Amino acid sequence: MADIDIRTTGRAGRITLTRPQALNAITYDMCLGIDTAMRNWREDDAVDLVILDAEGDKAFCAGGDIAELYDTGTKGDYHYGRRFWRDEYRLNALIFEYPKPVVSFLQGFTMGGGVGIGCHGSHRVVCDSSRIAMPEVGIGLVPDVGGSLMLALAPGRLGEYLATTAHRMGPDDAILAGFADHYIPRAQWADLIEMLESSGSAEHIETHARPAPIGELRGQEPEIDRLFDGETLGDILNALRANGTEFSQKRLATLRRHSPLAMACAVEMLHRLRGPSVSIRKALELEYRFTARAMEHGDFLEGIRAQIIDKDRNPQWQYPDMTVPAVAVSRMLQPLQQEGLTFEEETT
């Protein structure tokens, strides 16, 4: 496959994204290729671990390739998008539940669909250039690909903050929020990968890891916890408006650029997921309720038009006054009557 290099080297299954000119954005075919390889290696005693990396300096994977989603959706074909998200989410669950170590090396941008590929493994490595984010609300989606699980598990109210602001996390921020595990300078990655391939042991990662330079979120946690602890998007907006600090006003300006419906649903999703029964499958199933409706009833197509197609950066969101009725949130997140997300493995 031209966009991805899948092979076995030594004791390791190797997956390298090879479309750096597109910031390694993941296509539907790439998802299927990764899924097939990982299912095969799961049963292969010659493979002890899986290594995910990518070519180029700018990005591990800056998201999903949404051109086909937009093209089909604007023609009234919502089936393709639902199939894409369904199979992508199944892959996300496969990586999360994988019985062997999955090591990912996340340089540059890791966003959206890239998080679903790179941030569910057992050993997630970042470096100085790493910038990890869930920016979906900027195009009318909720944080998905299992990202809602990590946001729900993040300390305090970092989940609400990251979901609504789409803040780009540096290496320390990502480790704090639970999107990464280890900081290792990128100059050491090639030698480390060779060790992993020859030994089949992920223990080498621990010996190479170093403390990450302190990020910005640690110092902002108290203010984030205070301002983003509301039960609804409206509560958060009211807290930001009443606060009056430079921090709150900048975040309020950021939220005004994003889809109110998507942000309101994202906040509700995190609150539903928190608790002892939280799981990757529960998170993905809840995400799919939204994404399956996103083209027909949400802001997704308008978000893509404004940000990617026409690039006028002037999306005409639903609920432009940012007052989202509770019934609108419930409608987007109610169980699907047909074709809900399931995790049975299919033979392709």
Image (cartoon, helix red, strand yellow):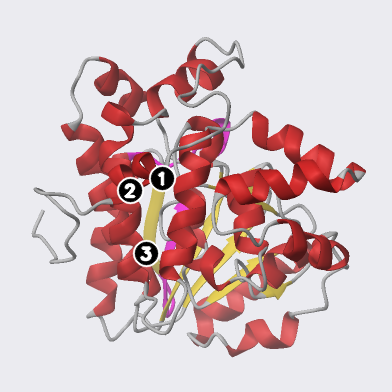
Magenta-drawn stretch contains 73: no
Res 330 label: 2
From the top left corner, tell me how far across and down residue 48 is, in percent. 39, 84
> Badge 1: few (under 14), some or many (20 or more) residues near its Cα, within 10 Å?
few
Q: Secondary structure at mark 2?
A: helix
**Cα–Cα span, label 1 and label 3:** 20 Å
Asked if the residue under mark 2 is in contact with the one under mark 1, i.e. CB atoms within 8 Å, the reply is yes
Q: Secondary structure at mark 1?
A: helix
Residue at 28% of width from left, 86% of height from top?
45
Q: Earlier in the sequence, mark 3 or mark 2?
A: 3
Within the image, what quadrant is residue 117 found in?
bottom left
Res 283 label: 3
**Kind of residue indicated by mark 3:** Ala
Residue stretch rendered in magenta on the structure: 9-27
From the top left corner, tell me how far across and down residue 90 is, in percent. 26, 60
Looking at the image, residue 150 lies above or below residue 132: below
Q: Secondary structure at mark 3?
A: helix
Asked if the residue under mark 2 is in contact with the one under mark 3, i.e. CB atoms within 8 Å, the reply is no
From the top left corner, tell me how far across and down residue 207 is, in percent. 72, 88
Within the image, what quadrant is residue 178 found in?
bottom right
Q: Is residue 56 left or right of residue 118?
A: right
**Cα–Cα span, label 1 and label 2:** 6 Å
Res 198 label: none
**Kind of residue indicated by mark 1:** Ala
Q: Is residue 51 left or right of residue 322?
A: left
